[in-house]
Amino acid sequence: MKIKNPNILAKTLHSFFDNYLPNLCGMSPHTILSYRDSLKLFLQFLSQRLQLSTTELTVDHIQTKEVIDFLDFLETDRENCIGTRNIRLSAIHGLFRYLGRDYPEYLDKSQRILNIPFKRSPTRAVGYLEFDEFDVVLKTIDRSNTFGRRDYALLSFMFNTGARAQEVVDLKVTDLQITKPYSVRLFGKGRKERICPLWSQTVKVLQEYLKDRNIDFRMPEPVFINHLKSPLTRFGIRYIMGKYVKLASNDMPSLKKKRLYPHSIRHSTAIHLLKSGVDLATISLWMGHNSVNTTNKYAVMDLEMKQKALEKAKPLSFIPSTKGKFNMSADIIQWLESL
């Protein structure tokens, strides 16, 4: 294979991550890291397949087939879900959209790769905790030690605010307002900032936990830390939640049937607010949604609310009818007109 412009791939990657994503696109550090991980996996896949070091790879080595084979590799060998596959493809699309803009000689190749479609996945029912289920989860936490008080404060805070796991990881002490009116400043997707109210009970458990750490509230220290005194990670939050859900399932068997993860607490918050009579517009602001249409999904996912709506609706009277009954000997046009 004739190698042209051997340094273009390296140059493009550097400017893509150093300037294009953070400055021109304004992407958050978290999103940029996701792109980095995706492209790193792709380059490692190419390197192994072509028996070349990653420093030897060029744009000419990347063909549509290699991208498609990489996506298949993710699903089969790495057993990634369709959502993860699509995230990896999004990063590749982003790189080649940028490449085609700066290097017209690769525009045709870029267009072919951009035409690789995202894969549709079946829509699953959103998992969430009922209020009494979440209450049982909290009661399983031993608050007689620092880590127990941390875990109780963590889950209580997440339920109060509906915060995403990454928002909790990024939370600093200086973002908390623990004098009235109680509130917290959260930074969501796209660096979107929102102020969320805190219940007095949430503030109390946060104060108990932070008192253990002798926190200076003027310093931007992370609110939730691990045993190494480093900020708690998303995986750490998932582990903590899973541990207590498993314990709580002994007293609340319904938990064993649910597929739960940290984002489920966010869904639980929205459902709890909806059941409490809070309007969708307010819930949308509370959750930091870009549009109230995103919040509408919570209005159709709760079985109890659906059942209550069904009970309020007047049922149709069932009257057997022979009108429109198909007779094999009848003219089919007459039958259709009789419907």
Image: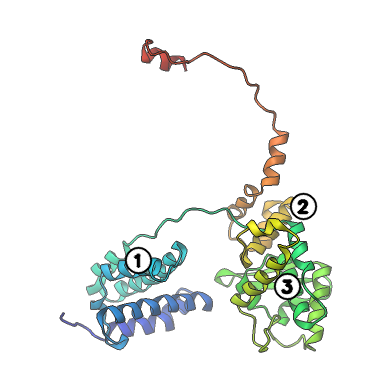
Question: Against 110, is 50 above or below?
Answer: below
Q: Nearer the viewer, residue 296 or 79?
A: 79
Quarter of the figure with the N terminus: bottom left
- Under tag 2, what secondary structure? loop
Q: Say if residue 222 shows up in the picture.
A: yes
In the picture, measured across the screen, residue 227 lies left or right of residue 9, that is right
Q: Residues within 10 Å of mark 2 (few under 14, many from 20)?
A: few
Reading the image, the residue beneath label 2 is 276
Disc 3 from disc 2: Cα separation: 21 Å
- Under tag 1, what secondary structure? helix
Q: How many marks?
A: 3
First-in-chain label (1 vs 3): 1
Reading the image, the residue beneath label 3 is 184
Residue 184 position, x and y percent, is 73, 72
Q: Residue furthest front?
A: 250
Q: Quadrant of residue 258?
A: bottom right
First-in-chain label (1 vs 2): 1
Q: Quadrant of residue 10?
A: bottom left
Disc 1 from disc 3: Cα separation: 43 Å
Disc 1 from disc 2: Cα separation: 45 Å
Circle on res. 72: 1
Q: Quadrant of residue 134?
A: bottom right
Q: Residues within 10 Å of mark 3 (few under 14, many from 20)?
A: some
Q: Residue at x 28, y 71 (%)?
A: 66
Residue 25 position, x and y percent, is 46, 73
First-in-chain label (3 vs 2): 3
The type of colouring in the image is rainbow
Residue 46 position, x and y percent, is 30, 78
